Image: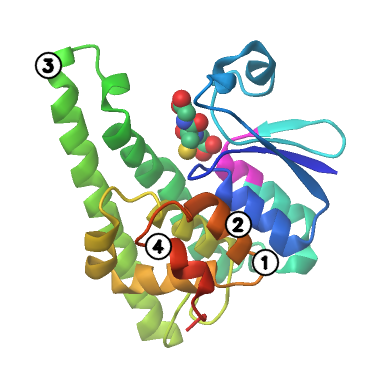
Amino acid sequence: MYRLYWKRATGAFAPNCVLAEAGAPHERVLVDVAAGEHHGSEYLKLNPRGQIPALVLPDGTVMTESLAIVLQLCDSFPEAGLLPAPGSSRRARCLRWMTFGAVDLYEADLRFSYAERYTVDPAGVEGVREAGRLAVERDWRLIEAALGETEQHEGEGPFLLGGRFTAADIHLAMLGGWHHDIPAFLEASPRAARLMRAVAARPAIAPLWRDYYGHKPAIAGFGEASAS
Ligand SMILES: N[C@@H](CCC(=O)N[C@@H](CS)C(=O)NCC(=O)O)C(=O)O
């Protein structure tokens, strides 16, 4: 049995979706961030960085880092087919954009949302926030272009690999749900918007979409939309 420590609108979404898509037996533990539980001694034993998610594997091994968790779960449940074959160019495409999302876009989102943590100069906070915002906008333009390339080579989406759904789509949909201006983002990034709708509407994911994004009016209903 896997144990996932989660909270809505966090990086627990992607591992949670992979567990659900793979049909992996798991339990979830909701972390009470408002009460500071993620900085309490019990949680810090799991993730000394005090961040969500954390996953405990069936043998007791503790994992943190959302992308690493997703890759580990995809390896553990190959029959779920959530990544193309190792060494294939399609897998390379998935790994490229998942890593970009985890390293560049995720961090840009954090700089925008928690700007005060990225400078020791109080006068610099707004500058950090604005740089984070600009990086988020730039990164989504790059992802939108990558989805456009898919259309040229593999036909209509909705996914990064055209008609084939992968863990990379879960990862991109998760990041899209965190955008600081979702209505403007959906309008500027129609391919990303279509991908998010298609991911959210998957039967295994729709209930999770409600858990993680049901509080965001602009995207709350995506889990109810038909995948198209
Ligand atoms: N690199 C980490 C980042 C995790 C992270 O920043 N988690 C956020 C939620 S999305 C968090 O726990 N924030 C609470 C805090 O930092 O106080 C990962 O991918 O798992």
Q: Which mark lies nearer to you, 4 or 3?
A: 4
Name the residue: 23% across, 52% down: 137
Amino acid type at image mark 4: Ile
Q: Say the numbered circle drawn on residue 204.
A: 1
In the rendering, at what x and y percent does residue 202 appear?
Answer: 60, 72
Q: Are marks 2 and 4 in contact (CB under 8 Å)?
A: no
Residue 123: mark in rendering: 3
Q: Which residue is mark 4?
A: 219
**Gap in Å between the C-alphas at discs 4 and 1?**
17 Å
Mark 3, mark 2: which one is toward the viewer? Answer: 2
| Sooner in the amino-acid sequence: mark 2 or mark 4 | 2
- SS for callout 4: loop
Residue drawn at (52%, 73%) of the image: 224
Q: Callout 3 environment at 10 Å: few (<14), some (14 to 19), or many (20+)?
A: few
For the residue pair 40 and 19, the one nearer the viewer reads as 40
Q: Secondary structure at mark 2?
A: helix
Residue 62, percent from left and from top: 73, 30
Instruction: Report which residue position mark 2 lands on.
Output: 208
Q: Residues within 10 Å of mark 1 (few under 14, many from 20)?
A: some
Amino acid type indicated by mark 1: Ala
Task: Kindly check if marks 1 and 2 are in contact, taking CB atoms under 8 A apart as contact.
Answer: yes
Question: Rounded to the nearest whole Å, what is the CA distance between mark 3 and mark 2?
Answer: 39 Å
Q: Give the CA distance from mark 2 to mark 4.
A: 13 Å
Q: As drawn, is 144 to the left or to the right of 39?
A: left
